Image (spheres, rainbow, N blue to C red):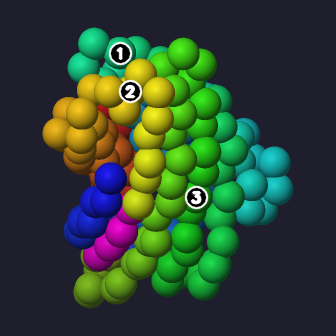
Amino acid sequence: MDMSGEERIAAPREAVWAALNDPDVLKDCIPGCQSLTKKSPTELEATVRVKIGPVSATFNGAVTLSDLNPPESYTISGEGKGGIAGFAKGGAAVRLTEDGDETILSYDVQAQVGGKIAQLGSRLIDSTSKKLAGQFFSDLGARLNGGESA
């Protein structure tokens, strides 16, 4: 699965960068995130519960940040195992561009899924991924603007 997008966030680039590197903010904004622990400045462990169509699974995995160029860009990659539901692995190139008092966050994602989840079909997986990404950016924007995430 490949997905690209661009989101306008009403916050300065430095604030967006800080939020994208804060495990507490990420835990609150990632849909279904049950835990997110920083193991080092570039390594995190996560537990995320997701529902794709009729399949619900809890994924445990590792996340790595690389190619760090603060506050402009980084690459985030990870792999999670969801037991009988299967696995997910992939990465995203994330870029932050200043636009006045706002920030444009651009991303290019490549991901693979296997197991029971892969049998659901790419259409359902793609639409669920887009919905979850939309919820993440909505919650991140709300958090950066002093509101609470949904």
Q: Is residue 24 above or below residue 150?
A: below
Q: Which of 106 and 149 is in front in this view?
A: 106
Q: Is residue 76 above or below residue 54?
A: below
State the separation of the CA atoms marked 3 and 2.
19 Å
Q: Residue 117 carries which label?
A: 2
Query: Which residue does the image show at 24% across and 41% down from the upper left?
Result: 122
Residue under pointer 1: 55
Numbered range of the magenta stretch: 104-109
Q: In this view, does 6 lie to the left or right of 32?
A: left
Given contact means CB atoms under 8 Å apart, are the residues at marks 1 and 2 in contact?
yes
Q: Split into 4 quadrants, where in the image is the C terminus?
A: top left
Instruction: Locate residue 86, reporting x and y percent.
Output: 51, 27
SS class, disc 3: strand
Q: Residue furthest right?
A: 40
- Looking at marks 3 and 2 on the same chain, the residue that comes earlier in the sequence is marked by 3
Q: Is residue 72 above or below residue 41?
A: below
Amino acid type of the residue tagged 1 in the rendering:
Val
Is 105 colored magenta in this rendering? yes
Residue under pointer 3: 77
For label 2, count other residues whose C-alpha is less than 10 Å away and answer few (under 14), some (14-19) or many (20+).
Answer: many
Q: Is residue 71 above or below residue 137?
A: below
Q: Which of 133 and 4 is in front in this view?
A: 4
SS class, disc 2: helix
State the separation of the CA atoms marked 1 and 2.
7 Å
- Looking at marks 3 and 1 on the same chain, the residue that comes earlier in the sequence is marked by 1
Residue 90 appearing in the image: yes
For label 3, count other residues whose C-alpha is less than 10 Å away and answer few (under 14), some (14-19) or many (20+).
Answer: some
- Looking at marks 1 and 2 on the same chain, the residue that comes earlier in the sequence is marked by 1
Amino acid type of the residue tagged 2 in the rendering:
Ile
Is 60 colored magenta in this rendering? no
Amino acid type of the residue tagged 3 in the rendering:
Ser
Query: Which residue does the image show at 27% across and 26% down from the upper left?
Result: 120
